[in-house]
Image: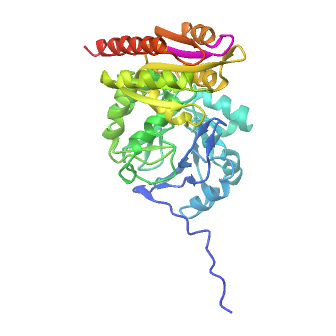
Amino acid sequence: MPDKKVIHMNAYAIPEISENVFWVGSKDWNRRLFDALIPLPQGTTYNAYFVKGNEKTALIDSVNPGFEKELEGKIEQISSVKDLDYLVMNHAEPDHSGSIPYILNLAPKAVLVTTEKGAKMATMYHNIPQERMMIVKQGDSLDLGGKTLKFVEAPWLHWPETMFTFLEEDRVLFSCDFFGAHTAFGFYDDDVEDLISLAKRYFGEIMMPFKGLGKKGLEKARELDPLIIAPSHGPLYRNPERIFEAYSDWTVGKTKEKVIIPYVSMWNSTENMVKVIVETLIAEGIEVCLYNLANADIGDIAKDLVDSRGIVVGTPTLLGGMHPLALNAVNLAKVLRPPFKYAAALSSYGWGGGALNQLQKILETTKLEIVGAVDVNGPCKEEDFDKVRELGMELARKIKEDSE
Ligand code: FEO
C-alpha cells in the first residue's frame, strides 16, 4: 500500500514582497465575525512580515491567537525563530499582538519595539517585562544592516498607541490597520476586483470615527512615498495611489448626493412609506441605498455611511419605543461618526406611539439637521404618502443644494 501523501509543514507560502522582506501572516478564510459585531463575508487576514537585514532580523506584527504555530513555521523557513532580534508591535489589538508572547518565548534575545503607549498595553495584555521592550518615538529608526526601519506615530489608527513602520531602502510602509480590508482573498491589490469597496467597508467600520486623525495619517503616508503599502488586513498595495485617492475622500468626509435608508417594518406601514420616499429621491436624481434591517449586513451599512449625505430611518413603534433593530442601527451610525448632514424619520404605530419621539431624541444629540418626520397611525392613507413625498422632495433639495 503506498504511503499517504504527507504535507510538510515547511511548505508554507511566504511571498517575498521585496528583497529579503517576506509575508509570514495568516489567512483566516472561515472567520465570519470580528469584535462579535462586524460580519466578515470573505474572512480576513492577519498580515505579519519578516525583514532580514545583513546583521539583524525583525518581525513586523504578529497574528491572531490560534495561528502562532503557523507563524513560527513560516519564520523557520527563512531563519531560526530563536535568533530573532526585534518584534515590532505597530498596534496592540490582539489580532496583531496575540502571538507576541509565543514568539518572545521562542526568541530569548528578541526585543519588542513599540510606542510608549504600546508598551503599557503590551504589559496589560501580555505581561511583557520592561527589559524586553524598546520604546520608540516619531522619527526613530532601527538599523538591521542594509534595512532601516523608521517609526511613524499614527495615534488612533486604530487605537491610541498605533504607529506605522517604514522600511526605508525598500520603501515598504507597514501601516497595520490603516489602509486595511477584511478579506482573505488575493495577495496584491490588483488581484481583488472589488478591493476599494472592501476597503471602504473596512474604513466605515474601523477608521471613520477617527477620520480627522486619518487625514493626518494619510499625509504622513504620502510623504513617505512608499512603493508598497503592506497593511495588516487584506491585500498589499503595489499601486499605493489607488488607496491614497480613496482615503483622501473618505478622511475628509466627502459626501455624494446619496441617502442611506436603514429601516424595519412589521405590518408594512413603515415599509410602504419607505417605498414612496425611495421613488421620490430617485426621481430627484439622488442615489439611494436601502437596507432592510431584518436581514441587512451592517458592514454594508458602514460602507455606505462613508459618503452618504443624508439618512432616512424607518421604524415602527414596538412596546413604546423604536424597534430594537432600528435602535441598534441608529446607535451604530452615531458612534461611527459618518459625515452625513441631513436626517428624516418615517415611523408608524398601532395603538400608541413612541418610536418617533425616541428617534428624535437620539438624532438631536448629533449634528444632523432633521429635515422632517412622518408618523402614521395604522395603515398609510393617501395623505400620509403625500407627506412622505413632500419630505423626500425637501430632503433631495437640501442634498442637492450642498453640491452647488
Ligand atoms: Fe486589526 Fe485594530 O486591529
Residue 185 percent location from the top left of the image = 48, 53
Q: Residue at x 61, y 8 (%)?
A: 357
Does the magenta portion include 362?
Answer: no
Q: Nearer the viewer, residue 332 or 4?
A: 332
- Image vertical order of residue 186 relative to residue 1, above or below: above
* Position of 301 relative to 240 (above/below): above
Q: Position of residue 253 (x, y in %)?
A: 39, 21
Q: Determine which quarter of the picture holds residue 12.
A: bottom right
Quadrant location of the C terminus?
top left
Quadrant in the rendering for residue 179: top left
**Whole-percent x and y of residue 356?**
59, 11
Residue at image position (57%, 46%) is: 86
Q: How many marks?
A: 0
Q: Residue furthest front?
A: 382
Residue 254 visible (yes or no): no
Judge left or right: residue 340 versus residue 31: left
Queried whether the magenta region covers residue 351, the answer comes back as yes
Residue 281, by quadrant, is: top left
Residue lying farthest right? Answer: 127
Q: Which residues fall within the magenta stretch?
A: 345-355
Question: In which quadrant will I find the N terminus?
Answer: bottom right
